[in-house]
Image (cartoon, rainbow, N blue to C red):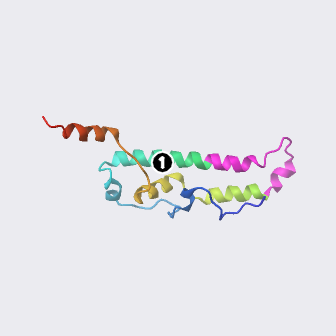
Amino acid sequence: MKYNNTTNTMDYKKVKTEPVAVTRRMRDFTRSTENIYETVALISKRANQISLELKEELNKKLSEFTTANDNLEEVFENREQIEIAKFYEKLPKPTLIAVQEFLDDQIYYRNPLRETEKKTTNVII
């Protein structure tokens, strides 16, 4: 099995983002939520989701290489595992992907507390 980096199944790998942290404007994060703390909570939850998806996918790909009797020679000579590991190391961190998704309005979220506040303010007495 030869691992091909161009056949990605998950959409978050195709997100165009910087592989390192960059300075961003705070106004961009409060634009839709009007609360920086809520934004940070949203981004952290999305980053956890992305991290779990990446971990599951990596474990699935690496499980193909596991055998009952691992020889020391097989461990060092398996180039395909090294290619897979290098690919995942080059991916942007889940937090950076989540930040970019948030800024591109690709994250769906809702706040039930705000929805109940809107309903109570629209009541006619």
Q: Quadrant of the N terminus?
A: bottom right
Is 17 left, or right, of 83 in this rendering? left
Q: At 48% across and 48% down in the image, what residue appears?
A: 46
* SS state under label 1: helix
Q: Position of residue 96 (x, y in %)?
A: 49, 56
Specify start and end residues of the magenta stretch as a single range.
55-78
Residue 9 sits above or below residue 35 on the image: below
Is 122 left, or right, of 10 in this rendering? left
Q: Position of residue 59 (x, y in %)?
A: 68, 46
Type of secondary structure dominating the magenta stretch: helix
Residue type, label 1: Arg
Q: At 61% across and 60% down in the image, what residue appears?
A: 90
Name, please, the residue furthest toward the top: 125
Q: Quadrant of the C terminus?
A: top left
Q: Position of residue 11 (x, y in %)?
A: 55, 57
In the picture of the structure, the residue carrying the numbered disc 1 is 46
On whether residue 30 falls in the magenta region, the answer is no
Q: Residues within 10 Å of mark 1 (few under 14, many from 20)?
A: many
Q: Position of residue 99 (x, y in %)?
A: 44, 55
The quadrant holding residue 89 is bottom right
Name, please, the residue furthest toward the left: 125
Residue 15 sits above or below residue 45 on the image: below
On whether residue 70 falls in the magenta region, the answer is yes
Q: At 51% across and 64% down in the image, what residue appears?
A: 16
Name, please, the residue furthest toward the front: 124
Q: At 45% across and 58% down in the image, what residue appears?
A: 100
Residue nearest the observer in this picture, 16 or 37: 16
Count of marks placed on residues: 1
